[in-house]
Image (spheres, grey):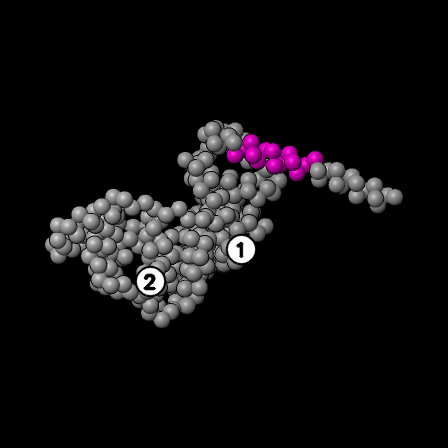
Amino acid sequence: MKIKYLIMIILSITLVVIPVYADDYQEGMDAFGRKDIKTALKKFKPLAEKGHLKAQTRLGWMYENGKGVPQDYKQAVKCFRRSAEQGFAKAQYKLGTLYNYGLSVPQDYKEAVRLYLLSAEQGYVDAQYNLGVLYHDGQGVPKDYKEAVKWYRLSAEQGFASAQYNLGVMYGNGQGVPQDYKEAIRLFRLAAEQGDAKAQYNLGVMYANGQGVPQDYVSAHMWWNLSGSNGHKSAVKNRNIVEKKMSKQQKGKAQELARNWKPRVKKKSIFEQLRETWDKVTK
């Protein structure tokens, strides 16, 4: 009877405390949505001290970016570390990024790799991508194109445009995979359709040169036009050069295609949905 009574007490405490934490955290997020940073900070700080993973990570972000508090990378590191040590993927990624760039901690690519790996193995798309970059560049680990391809692919499969672009480059150059222009085109297109300027530029190059696709100046012009509109200066130069090889009718068609182009809305991963929600409320 005593054991049963004790269990009932513990359960009742759990049922009372957890909703309070949840309510406080949501009130903090609601305050952020209203741009009431002081109230958000007031809600997040006590939760972070009690070990609330998301509150610790949010608080770390506030210190990292100087939102509601003086910018303090050391405090950001402290908050991210507490959450990361409990296995929270986003905090592991954020802490890894601070080590990657040497912000308030000595730059340490090996530690960045370790933390990115912990996060990436949980499916965190940004960590997968960054891990691919470190393997590609040989920072913190021996340069390994096959490993880079592995992590780029996992990130790309979640729809991450930068990973799709980088994986396309790997296929185009035959790094870590057999050279395959058709696969490079497919990946560049996935990223380009999300508005990635570099992928749009590379699509233009491949259409102009007939790599993986039949040579097509109209498509090259269209993609360079879109890439140039996104700030890619070389795309504008290439578009102007290829125009000299096109008829007036072809130029008109290419311009019409560019005018009518719309980015494709992809199905976002849960991590991207959470990141976008956070970005919206912290503008």
Is 224 situated left or right of 279 in this image? left
The residue located at (59%, 42%) in the rendering is: 52
Count how many numbered circles sit on residues in the image. Answer: 2
Element at label 1? loop
Magenta-colored span: 16-29
Q: Relative to 184, is 271 above or below?
A: above
Residue at image x 47%, y 28%?
Answer: 34
Precedes in sequence: disc 2 or disc 1: 1
Any part of residue 283 in sight? yes
Q: Pick out the residue farthest to the front.
A: 249
Q: Residue 263, position in %: x, y?
A: 34, 46
Q: Residue at x 39, y 59 (%)?
A: 133
The residue identified by callout 1 is: 122
Q: Is residue 198 left or right of residue 53?
A: left
Mark linked to residue 184: 2
Q: Give, as a three-letter code, the residue at label 2.
A: Ala
Farthest-out residue, right:
1
From the top left corner, tell me how far across and down residue 7 is, in percent. Answer: 79, 43
